[in-house]
Amino acid sequence: MTINQIANLMSLPIATICLFATIKYFLIYKISRNDMSYIIGVSMSFIFIGSFVGFAGEANIAGNKLNTEWAGSCGACCGAIFIVLSSLVKSYTQMQQLKKWQLVAMVLFIIVILLTPFYPPTKSPPIALSLNAVRMIIHTSAFIRYLALYLSKRTRFSLLMWMAFSTMVIGYALNIPGILQSSLAPFAIIAAAVRIAAYLTMIVAYFIG
């Protein structure tokens, strides 16, 4: 098994963690009709679907050799964006608007997945670095948002979310050496392990925050 295959295999724990969170929050929503639970459930489903599609493509499941890293990046970014937007909601009207935007984004995300056969390979450094940079920018924005919330409110939830997103940024930053130099590919395994820790921290934040 190659280093890239091992790193890709580590996407499964991330997908599993987010699937667990998705199911849990949809169940909470079904019982309580709490809109925030719905928004978090959908946000986690973006990450779950993106992680699983990315894993399936890299592992050549069913013999496919599709460039699914595009869909994987899209799922991670959409999930992070809506988690941040949920922290900005201040009224019932805004909550309903956010739910509608999630529906639109999910439709667009499905289109992104369906267009997978037409994307260029992501193995070349410029494309790989670009996708990684977009994820770093979005997750850095999330990190800054929850850091600001923690500094203003000092809540356990904002602290854990700040820790989760800062760890996520570190995880994506650790991808860079392997992208630039093939001999540093083992960094991809470390990066994946760091991101697993980040998602676990995020789940803990939502469960006890």
Image (cartoon, rainbow, N blue to C red):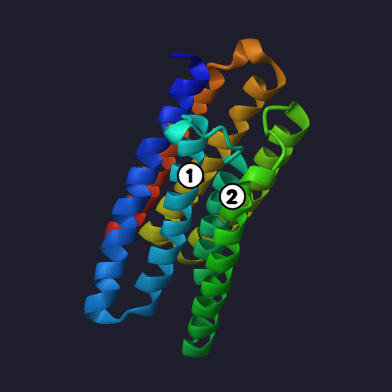
Q: Looking at the picture, does residue 187 appear above or below residue 121?
A: above
Q: Looking at the picture, does residue 127 appear above or below residue 151?
A: above
Does the rendering let one see residue 148? no
The residues bearing labels 2 and 1 have C-alpha atoms spaced at a distance of: 20 Å
Tell me where residue 147 sits by quadrant: bottom right
Q: Can you name the residue that lies furthest to the left here?
A: 31
Give the amino acid at mark 1: Val
The residue wearing badge 2 is 139
Give the amino acid at mark 2: His
The residue wearing badge 1 is 53
User: Callout 1: helix, strand or loop?
Assistant: helix
Residue 35 position within the rendered picture, expressed as x and y whole percent measured from the top left: 38, 79
Say left or right for 157 vs 190: left
* Residue at 63 percent of width and 55 percent of height: 141
* Residue at 59 percent of width and 46 percent of height: 73
User: Callout 2: helix, strand or loop?
Assistant: helix
Say left or right for 193 vs 169: left
Question: Viewer-proximal residue, 95 or 155?
Answer: 95
Tell me where residue 181 sits by quadrant: top right
Q: Looking at the picture, does residue 79 appear above or below residue 198?
A: below
Q: Can you name the residue that lies furthest to the front here?
A: 63
Mark earlier in primary sequence (2, 1): 1
